[in-house]
Image (cartoon, rainbow, N blue to C red):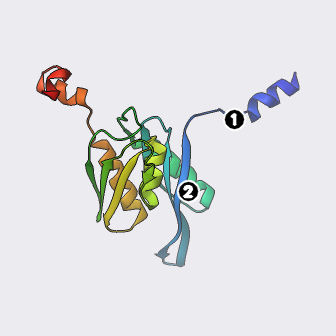
Amino acid sequence: MANRRKEARTKEKKTDWQERVVQIRRVTKVVKGGKKLSFRAIVVIGNEKGQVGVGVGKAGDVIGAVKKGVADGKKHLVDVPLTRSYSIPHPSNGIGGGAKVFMRPAAPGTGVIAGGAVRTVLELAGVRNVLAKQLGSNNPLNNARAAADALASLRTFADVADERDIPVEQLYI
């Protein structure tokens, strides 16, 4: 009886969400008594099935900062429409602070051609064939947010057809 209860407590829930830490920075705040140290973690969370989020967490220790970052990432989830070849439906631009990100669909077999935080965001979103370029700032937080912004602005053919009140087949004419 006691073993069963212990197993239930220690069992972790299996989820399809993955989390990757993009950056951990030691930051300080100057207070009356001196400097107060804390950690800032930039975390990208995604399920590789079209959902991804970028979160930031600050805490006195690294583990606490990462946990807060994961919670923040879950609050800022973005749905990504994927094509059959696990690419994006059309070219897209995103802005986050001083960073700009340009994304373009790619042929099957191309892979994820992107750098830094943008690559992490795309991989955890489930995009497998895409070309992306960071323009402007090379700040990982702003680039990750710009990538999420670009993915959030994507629309499918069905969405466009619904907005125009026409059948999808008429878009190809």
Q: Residues within 10 Å of mark 2 (few under 14, many from 20)?
A: many
Query: Is residue 89 or residue 116 the one in the foreground?
Result: 89
User: Label 1 belongs to which residue?
Assistant: 12
Q: Residue at x 48, y 50 (%)?
A: 44
Q: Is residue 157 above or below residue 33?
A: above
On-image quarter of the C terminus:
top left
Q: Amino acid at mark 1?
A: Glu
Res. 50 image quadrant: top left
Answer left or right for 75 relative to 152.
Answer: right
Residue 100 picture location, percent across and down: 29, 60
> Which secondary structure lies at badge 2?
helix
Q: Is residue 67 above or below residue 136?
A: above
Q: Residue at x 33, y 55 (%)?
A: 146
> Which secondary structure lies at badge 1?
loop
Residue 52 picture location, percent across and down: 43, 42
Return the mark for residue 65: 2
Query: Is residue 34 or residue 75 the one in the foreground?
Result: 75
First in sequence, mark 2 or 1: give its number. Answer: 1
Q: Is residue 72 visible to us here? A: no
Return the mark for residue 160: none
Q: Is residue 104 above or below residue 10?
A: below
Q: Residues within 10 Å of mark 1 (few under 14, many from 20)?
A: few
